[in-house]
Image (spheres, rainbow, N blue to C red):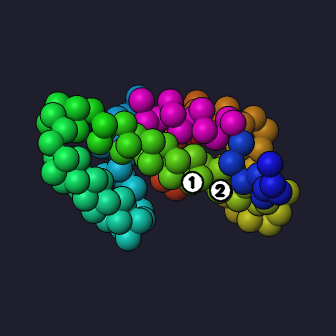
Amino acid sequence: MGLSDKLVDSRDVLRAVMEVRRLGSGRVLRELETLEVDLAEFLMEELGNVHRQLLDLRVKPKVVRRLIRRVESLAVVLVTALRLAQLRLWRQDAANTPLAEIDPTLSEGTKSSDADDDQGQGCGPPSNDEP
């Protein structure tokens, strides 16, 4: 195996899987569409292309729908895991800096990597309305 920047760890992947299972890939994809318009648009266009190609191959529509849901879920989990990992790293970098003094929630994520799970935070930015 080659060198890696180790941005995403297994906890990020598991958190992403849990989030997508809890909310559904469609909802997470809609949230992603508001945050990363171009990325979500590309993903949806490619899913549509794969859908059409499978139907052109005379694959049964029920099988096509099941496969598209699996591929959509896979892609959404991967993007969500990357977003969660980046947020975790930003919080780690912000800990014990003047930025963390301005927004104490930034250093909360470094105390316990499960802190975000308790806050019910998705793949979006942290909200300021939390206690």
Residue closest to the eye, 119 or 88: 88
Would residue 108 appear left or right of 122 to someone viewing this image? right
Residue that appears at 43% across and 47% down: 76
Q: Position of residue 47 (x, y in %)?
A: 29, 54
Q: Judge left or right: residue 130 versus residue 53.
A: right
Amino acid bearing label 1: Arg
In-front residue for pair 116/48: 48
- Mark 2 nearby-residue class (10 Å; few <14, some 14–19, many ≥20): some
Which residue is drawn at the image coordinates 78% and 58% (left, top)?
5
Residue bearing mark 2:
86
Q: Is residue 47 visible?
A: yes
| Residue underneath mark 1 | 83
Across and down, in percent, residue 65 comes to: 22, 37
User: Element under label 2?
Assistant: helix
Instruction: Tell me the kind of residue under disc 2.
Output: Gln
Range of the magenta residues?
Answer: 10-21
Query: Measured from the top left, where is residue 6 in percent x and y?
Result: 77, 52
Position of 110 compared to 28: left or right? Answer: right
**Residue at position x 27%, y 62% from top?**
45
Q: Is residue 126 visible?
A: no
Residue closest to the far bottom: 38
Badge 1, how many Cα within 10 Å: few under 14, some, many 20+? many
